């Protein structure tokens, strides 16, 4: 199914009806709603009877638009379109990698709706402060062109544009206290080679909520899609449902 955003983008989504609070999955950079974590969460919500939505940002998966034209701000607007038009009442956002950044921005925009957050290898401010991105920034901005950043598995290529970097800087979170006060659970693998686990610790320090938990997973990678990792994710979501009602 599709919903059209204010930007005219056709946003692909899948929704199941259920109890409040609803749960929304925010995917990562160049990932889509068919991934392991998004699909697993849907099965969890079906079993618990919770409402659930997963979707693709513009330029991702089955949604329209070109990936190279996307920015943190435009993908945030996609997420807010889904939140505002496809959900009702209190919501828990589960955000993976870039989705962990976008869920924070969404919570700041809709504090009355967002009652809890679960971050999986959260990557706020990744366009400027990850070590490999600092090199990319210099290359992209100097030449004003697209830099094709290969993934560590050499399977995926990430097009990095000057606009992605400069626009992304306007959504930085980690340079000041973050006025989010709902419960937050952050999961991060100690073996994450893409986003260091210290990122989640710093995020926890910046959040003004008094209810922030960081779980560091030994031998956990960036994806955290193994069976034991998914069980931890399910446990985090389950523990927050009563708090988010």
Image (cartoon, rainbow, N blue to C red):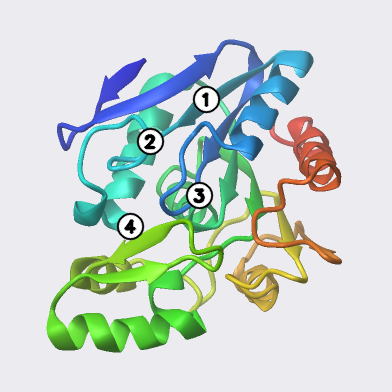
Q: CA distance from mark 4 to mark 2?
A: 17 Å
Residue 172 visible in the shown view: no
Question: Disc 2 to disc 1, how far (Cα)?
Answer: 15 Å
x and y percentages locating residue 199 in the rendered image: 62, 74
The residue beneath circle 3 is 103
Please tell me whether residue 208 is drawn above or below residue 9 in the rendered image.
Answer: below
Q: Quadrant of the N terminus?
A: top left
Res. 61 mark: 2
CA distance for labels 3 and 2: 19 Å
The residue positioned 51% from the left and 35% from the top of the image is 113
- Left or right for 201, reference 115: right
Give whichever of discs 3 and 1 has the lower sequence position: 1
**Whole-percent x, y for residue 156 in the image:** 44, 56
Whole-angstrom CA distance, mark 3 to mark 1, is 14 Å
Q: Nearer the viewer, mark 4 or mark 2?
A: 2
| Residue beneath disc 1 | 53
Image position of 245 with respect to 173: above or below: above
The tag earlier along the polypeptide, 3 or 4, is 4
Q: Mark 4 sits on what residue? A: 72
- Which badge, 3 or 2, is on the more N-terminal residue? 2
- N-term-proximal mark, 1 vs 4: 1
């Amino acid at each position: 199914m599709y919903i059209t955003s204010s930007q005219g983008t056709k946003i692909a989504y899948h929704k199941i009806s259920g109890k409040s609070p609803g749960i929304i999955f925010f995917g990562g950079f160049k990932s889509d709603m068919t991934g392991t974590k998004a699909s697993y969460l849907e099965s969890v919500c079906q079993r618990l009877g919770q409402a659930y939505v997963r979707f693709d940002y513009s330029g991702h998966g089955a949604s329209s638009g070109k990936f190279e034209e996307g920015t943190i701000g435009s993908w945030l607007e996609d997420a807010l379109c889904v939140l505002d038009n496809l959900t009702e009442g209190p919501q828990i956002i589960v955000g993976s990698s870039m989705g962990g950044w976008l869920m924070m921005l969404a919570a700041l925009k809709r504090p009355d709706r967002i009652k809890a957050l679960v971050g999986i290898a959260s990557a706020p401010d990744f366009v400027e402060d990850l070590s490999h991105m600092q090199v990319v920034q210099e290359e992209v901005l100097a030449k004003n062109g697209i830099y094709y950043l290969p993934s560590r598995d050499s399977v995926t290529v990430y097009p990095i544009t000057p606009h992605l970097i400069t626009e992304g800087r306007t959504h930085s979170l980690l340079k000041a206290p973050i006025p989010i006060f709902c419960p937050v659970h952050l999961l991060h693998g100690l073996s994450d080679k893409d986003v260091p686990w210290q990122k989640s610790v710093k995020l926890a320090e910046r959040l003004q909520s008094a209810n922030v938990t960081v779980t560091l997973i030994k031998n956990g990678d960036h994806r955290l899609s193994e069976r034991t990792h998914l069980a931890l994710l399910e446990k985090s979501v389950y523990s927050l449902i009563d708090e988010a009602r």
